[in-house]
Amino acid sequence: EAGVAQSPRYKIIEKRQSVAFWCNPISGHATLYWYQQILGQGPKLLIQFQNNGVVDDSQLPKDRFSAERLKGVDSTLKIQPAKLEDSAVYLCASSVEVGAGVNTEAFFGQGTRLTVV
Amino acid sequence: SQQGEEDPQALSIQEGENATMNCSYKTSINNLQWYRQNSGRGLVHLILIRSNEREKHSGRLRVTLDTSKKSSSLLITASRAADTASYFCATDAGGGSEKLVFGKGTKLTVNP
């Protein structure tokens, strides 16, 4: 079974530039997550999709971050404009459809390491 | 916001010893999960324990859950150098939320 695919693996940009990350979840997984992990910290949930609807985006800085999940499959996360504090690893994960407030095992991609200079 | 809080933040042991990590959380949950992360890699799911379960085993892993104390522990027995990694607990955010929220993690070092 193919895992969660993310690209690119690494990205270096200057502050105020824009950047986009791509994620292809495991086939058939309805739930897709984007996390931000700053060095030495736990993953912070940015946005969670169920199919192509948003379950939660309460911690997504909407003035600069946006995410979409087209046709309930692939997803992109965009930052525009980037700030120095956005330097982090961006992790995408997917799981089978959850319901009634119950989570199941999440499968993670390798992540994209973003450095903003 | 962080739901789970792992303790200790860092743990260093010798190969063959047991490692115990704890997780405390704030609100009622449906289940609790433990994940492992090797340096520079994605997270890997280890075990899921439901709120009506008290203990669960998987190979050298033993997880306990005490919902009255809102806490869980992960025990790794007979540790190996390859167990060196960061370990995170994750829960739903409570109140019927389906969000999957992670703690800050415990960095485990197993010395050969």
Image (cartoon, coloured by chain):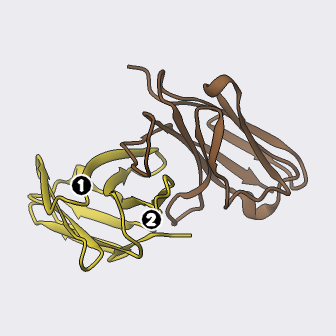
User: Which residue is pictured at 76% across the width and 45% down the height?
Assistant: A12
Give left or right: position of A82 versus A99: right
Could you tell me how far apart the alpha carbons at marks 1 and 2 are, in whole angstroms?
A: 15 Å
Q: Chain of mark 2?
A: B
> Which mark is nearer the camera, 1 or 2?
2
> How many marks can you see?
2
Front residue of B12/A100: it is A100
Three-letter code, disc 1: Ile
Q: Quadrant of residue B89?
A: bottom left
User: Which residue is pictured at 77% across the width and 54% down the height?
Assistant: A116
Percent from the top left, x then y, of residue B90? 39, 59
Say which label, 1 or 2, has the lower sequence index.
1
Query: Dot 2: few (<14), some (14–19), or many (≥20) neighbours within 10 Å?
Result: many
Reading the image, the residue beneath label 2 is B94
Reading the image, the residue beneath label 1 is B49
Q: Quadrant of residue B50?
A: bottom left
Q: Quadrant of residue A11?
A: top right
Tag 1, which secondary structure?
A: strand
Can marks 1 and 2 be said to lie on one chain? Answer: yes
Percent from the top left, x then y, of residue A83? 82, 60
Chain rendered yellow: B
Quadrant where the C terminus of chain A sits is bottom right
Tag 2, which secondary structure?
A: loop
Front residue of A101/B99: it is A101
Give left or right: position of B5 versus B109: right
Q: Compared to A70, does B65 lie above or below?
A: below
Chain rendered brown: A
Give left or right: position of B106 versus A5: left
Percent from the top left, x then y, of residue A110? 51, 38
